[in-house]
Image (cartoon, rainbow, N blue to C red):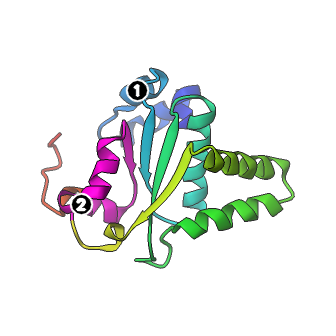
Amino acid sequence: LFGLFRDRRHKRKLANRIIIDDSSRLVELFTGKKIKRMDLIADNFGHELVSDLYLIDYLLRQGFVNQVYVHLKDKPYLVSDALIKDVFLLIKRLQRDLSPIAQDFAGRLETYLKEEKLILKDNSFWTTPQAFIDMPSDLMWDFVRSDFALIKGDLNYCKLIDCLYWPYNSR
């Protein structure tokens, strides 16, 4: 996503590997300041969670979004699943890092949490076999209030499409 805002060369390099490219619509959506609230359904801890939080940091700092809700699992379904406590562990780790860049990043994340620009939520739904169509109403209302949802992970993808067969050329 960062490359879409800065450098089109990367897009040209990957052009023959992309099935459907809606990147221009995505850039238009974010730069058009139409997203007040974004919801991100997280997947894994480690590098992936760092990347998720860096994306959130970037979008908040640039003013592309005002608030981000991060939906995490309430318990690990798979060994690498991200939990709320993992976000706080990550922030502590970044604070102890020798790099001022990592420390500044941790400070911004803490500020976002205090200012409620970054809200961490967990729900047992994320570790059930239920499809999105069967999402509990309290969680569904979270997404009704959202302007944009970013859904990550193969389990979440299966929950989204209810593991149905979709022809590869359908849109």
Magenta residues span 131-159
The residue drawn where x is 49% and y is 65% is 44
Q: Which residue is mark 2?
A: 135
Q: Amino acid at mark 2?
A: Met
Q: Which residue is mark 1?
A: 29
Around disc 2, counting alpha carbons within 10 Å, would you say few (fewer than 14), some (14 to 19), or many (20 or more)? some
Observer-nearest of 97 and 37 = 37
28 in relation to 1, above or below: above
- Could you say where residue 168 lies in the image, as x and y percent from the top left? 17, 49
Please tell me whether mark 2 sits on a helix, a strand or a loop. loop
Q: In the picture provided, is 92 more to the left or to the right than 86?
A: right
Is residue 2 shown to the viewer in this render? yes
Around disc 1, counting alpha carbons within 10 Å, would you say few (fewer than 14), some (14 to 19), or many (20 or more)? some
Q: Amino acid at mark 1?
A: Leu
Earlier-in-chain disc, 2 versus 1:
1
Q: In the picture provided, is 36 more to the left or to the right than 118?
A: left
Q: Quarter of the image for the C terminus: give it.
A: top left
Does 154 appear in magenta? yes
Observer-nearest of 105 and 26 = 105
| Extreme residue in the top direction | 32
70 in relation to 169, above or below: below
Observer-nearest of 32 and 5 = 32
93 in relation to 69, above or below: below
151 in relation to 21, above or below: below
The image quadrant of residue 161 is bottom left
The residue drawn where x is 56% and y is 47% is 118
